[in-house]
Image (cartoon, rainbow, N blue to C red):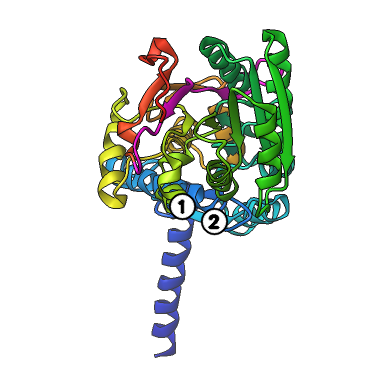
């Protein structure tokens, strides 16, 4: 009886050893074929960041994960992709902590969703140390890409380009005076610097006012602006301070008598109209697409699903995060690896597809390092609670802008 038990034990032992050898020979792909590949989303979901932007980027990210798993069959021959999320709260400290958690604890192989320039600048340094790709999805400071960090990637308009575009718009309108009212962050002060520079080159006078991003009353600075008699106000607030500027400028009779331009597409949000009501009519804003413009098949798959789920057209930032995650998935398949270093190598110099077209990250020295910039548009909300798709295209003419600004 004992001999028989020993024989049975020997058979089991030999079988287990043989199985272990087989799995070892097949490599990790056989043993871990279905382990999820994790992609991180690091965005603002609470103040003092812009949570309205963050939640929409999350909506876009969730659709990207759905597309990869359902339409692509996952990555690397069937591994599912999983989204892991952290709130950077619009602050550098929270951004650094969130990135470290996503990479070192959760095992994210890439991180998308960076929105605030000050946060992205801080996280960028950590990304270079930890060597996991980081995407600037909305942060526009040129210092981010000019760092030439091998692990930073940007599909975003940079501050100098957008400032130059605004000055060109002002010239086309015959404006002689631009008031720049900007938050005290890398985002706000960067724009103030470049608008002043390009304005001077164009013979346009500028006046700058910098405010703390936690401000609750802008009336004194708006009265000062009104006394200066500008032709255009560039509103470089992010989230609630941008709305506050519109409301209080209206209350003192500054706006809409003087035209106001938002630095990005916050006027399409329900949160904007909830904050300002009818006072928000006639605001202009900067965008990088308008619903109805041509998209790739990836964009055409995402847009109706987003609208059906959330009752609004996707913002550029939602589309951008969606596209970035798809680009990461394509790079993973290109590299045939979920190792962040291999993904980084595959991202550089190869052509991928996102929601709007082809994406290729190249390495020219300076601020265009790993940067793909979208086109610039100026749109206007000519009606109260106007849908994004119905916004009036004002500028530039090559995209159909008629150059006419509506007003009371």
Q: Earlier in the sequence, mark 2 or mark 1?
A: 2
Q: What residue is disc 1 on?
A: 55
**Can residue 100 be found in the magenta stretch?**
no
Circle 2 Cα neighbour tier, 10 Å, few/some/many (<14 / 14–19 / ≥20) = many
Name the image quarter holding residue 125: top right
**Can residue 382 be found in the magenta stretch?**
yes
- In this orientation, does residue 405 appear? yes
Residue 381 sits above or below residue 276 on the image: above
Q: Residue furthest bottom?
A: 1
Question: In the image, is 393 to the left or to the right of 57?
Answer: left
Circle 1 Cα neighbour tier, 10 Å, few/some/many (<14 / 14–19 / ≥20) = some
Quadrant placement of the C terminus: top left
> Is 29 in front, or is 226?
226
Name the image quarter holding residue 148: top right
Quadrant placement of the N terminus: bottom left
Secondary structure beneath label 2 = loop
Total number of numbered discs in the rendering: 2
Q: Taken as a whole, is the magenta stretch helix, strand or loop? A: loop
Q: What residue is disc 2 on?
A: 45
Please name the residue shown 44% across and 14% down the image: 396
Please name the residue shown 40% across and 29% down the image: 354
- In this orientation, does residue 322 appear? no
Please name the residue shown 29% across and 49% down the image: 311
Magenta stretch bounds = 362-385
Residue 20 sits above or below residue 291 on the image: below
Q: Position of residue 374 (x, y in %)?
A: 49, 23
Please name the residue shown 47% across and 49% down the image: 276
Q: Position of residue 194 (x, y in %)?
A: 70, 22
Circles 2 and 1: CB distance less than 8 Å? yes
Structural distance between the alpha carbons of marks 2 and 1: 6 Å
Q: Position of residue 403 (x, y in %)?
A: 42, 15
Q: Position of residue 325 (x, y in %)?
A: 45, 39
């Amino acid at each position: 009886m004992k001999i028989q038990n020993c024989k049975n034990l020997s058979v089991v032992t030999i079988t287990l050893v043989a199985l272990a050898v087989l799995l070892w020979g097949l490599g990790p792909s056989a043993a871990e074929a279905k382990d999820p590949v994790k992609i991180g989303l690091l965005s603002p979901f609470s103040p003092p960041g812009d949570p309205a932007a963050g939640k929409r980027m999350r909506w876009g990210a969730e659709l990207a994960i759905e597309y990869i798993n359902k339409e692509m069959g996952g990555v690397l021959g069937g591994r599912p992709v999983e989204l892991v999320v952290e709130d950077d709260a619009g602050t550098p400290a929270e951004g650094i902590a969130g990135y470290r958690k996503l990479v070192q604890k959760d095992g994210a192989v890439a991180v998308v969703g960076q929105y605030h320039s000050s946060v992205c600048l801080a996280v960028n340094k950590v990304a270079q140390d930890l060597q996991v790709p980081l995407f600037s999805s909305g942060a526009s400071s040129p210092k981010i890409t000019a760092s030439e960090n091998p692990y930073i990637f940007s599909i975003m308009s940079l501050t100098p380009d957008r400032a130059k575009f605004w000055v060109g718009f002002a010239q086309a309108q015959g404006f002689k005076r631009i008031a720049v009212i900007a938050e005290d962050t890398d985002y706000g002060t960067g724009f103030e610097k470049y608008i002043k520079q390009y304005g001077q080159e164009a013979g346009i006078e500028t006046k700058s006012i910098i405010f703390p991003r936690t401000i609750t009353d802008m009336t004194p600075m708006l009265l000062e602006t009104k006394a200066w008699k500008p032709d255009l106000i560039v509103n470089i607030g992010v989230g609630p301070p941008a709305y506050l500027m519109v409301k209080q400028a209206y209350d003192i009779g500054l706006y809409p008598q003087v035209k106001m331009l938002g630095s990005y597409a916050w006027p399409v949000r329900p949160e904007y109209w909830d904050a300002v009501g009818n006072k928000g009519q006639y605001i202009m804003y900067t965008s990088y697409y308008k619903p109805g413009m041509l998209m790739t098949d990836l964009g055409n798959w995402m847009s109706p699903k987003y609208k059906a789920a959330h009752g609004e057209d996707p913002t550029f930032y939602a589309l951008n995060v969606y596209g970035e995650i798809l680009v990461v998935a394509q790079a993973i398949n290109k590299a045939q690896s979920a190792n962040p270093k291999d993904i980084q190598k595959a991202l550089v110099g190869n052509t991928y597809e996102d929601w709007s077209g082809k994406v290729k990250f190249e390495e020219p020295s300076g601020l265009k390092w790993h940067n793909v910039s979208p086109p610039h548009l100026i749109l206007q909300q000519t009606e109260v609670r106007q849908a994004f798709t119905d916004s009036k295209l004002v500028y530039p003419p090559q995209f159909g802008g008629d150059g006419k600004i509506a007003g009371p």
